[in-house]
């Protein structure tokens, strides 16, 4: 039995498949710009500070909008809002400022809960409003 013609056929088939085969393109990351917060080159005008009012019944009001229920201890709505405010302030290269205006009859535990939410949102610019100033 002659091996020469069979080896020739194998080489012809090998060359045929090498020529007709398409090279496989390797997977790679696609560079896509997704929507999100983008750092601004110039500072935009956003409110200088957010005011949090604490009523005697425990209701928390952020810029005239009620947040959570008066009995809520974790304050998830306030936390989410303050996190968005912090992200916006960072994107605009400005400091996130919070002013807490607590009623004299508000419980101290409620004020501490608001301070804890500010800490969870990583907001360090927290001040208390002077009620004597506002009465005049």
Image (cartoon, rainbow, N blue to C red):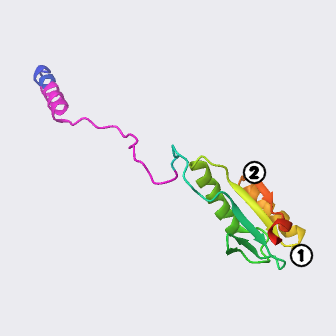
Q: At 52% across and 52% down in the image, what residue appears?
A: 37
Query: Where residue 109 sits: x, y (%)?
Result: 88, 68
- Which residue is most to the bottom? 57
Residue 59 against residue 39 in the figure, above or below: below
User: Given contact means CB atoms under 8 Å apart, are the residues at marks 2 and 1 in contact?
Assistant: no
Residue 101 against residue 23 in the figure, above or below: below
Q: At 61% across and 52% down in the image, what residue appears?
A: 89
User: As rendered, which of 12 and 109 lies closer to the eye?
Assistant: 109
Residue 11 sits inside the magenta stretch: yes
Count neighbours of disc 2 (C-alpha within 10 A) and say few if under 14, some if 14 to 19, many if 20 or more.
some
Residue 92 against residue 71 in the figure, above or below: above
Can you tell which mark lies on residue 79? none
Quadrant of the image containing the C terminus = bottom right
Left or right: 102 in relation to 96: right
Counting residues from the N terminus, which is met first, the one under dot 2 or under dot 1?
1
Query: Where residue 10 sits: x, y (%)?
Result: 17, 27
Quadrant of the image containing the N terminus = top left
Count of residue discs: 2
Residue 68 sits inside the magenta stretch: no
User: As rendered, which of 52 and 83 lies closer to the eye?
Assistant: 52
Q: Secondary structure at mark 2?
A: loop
Can you tell which mark lies on residue 105? 1
Q: Which residues are magenta?
A: 9-37
Query: Where residue 86 sits: x, y (%)?
Result: 65, 54
**Marks 2 and 1, how far apart at CA:** 25 Å
Count neighbours of disc 1 (C-alpha within 10 A) and say few if under 14, some if 14 to 19, many if 20 or more.
few
Can you tell which mark lies on residue 124? 2
Q: At 44% across and 51% down in the image, what residue appears?
A: 34
Left or right: 58 in relation to 15: right
């Amino acid at each position: 039995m002659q091996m020469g013609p069979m080896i020739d056929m194998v080489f012809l088939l090998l060359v045929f498949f090498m020529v007709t085969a398409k090279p496989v393109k390797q997977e790679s990351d696609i560079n896509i710009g997704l929507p999100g917060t983008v750092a601004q080159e110039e500072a935009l005008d956003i409110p200088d500070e957010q005011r949090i009012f604490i009523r005697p019944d425990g209701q928390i009001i952020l810029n005239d909008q009620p947040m959570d229920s008066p009995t809520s201890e974790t304050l998830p709505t306030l936390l989410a809002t303050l996190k968005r405010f912090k992200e916006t302030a960072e994107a605009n290269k400005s400091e996130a400022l919070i002013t807490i205006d607590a009623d004299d009859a508000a419980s101290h535990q409620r004020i501490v809960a608001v301070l804890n939410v500010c800490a969870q949102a990583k907001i360090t610019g927290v001040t208390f409003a002077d009620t004597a100033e506002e009465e005049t």
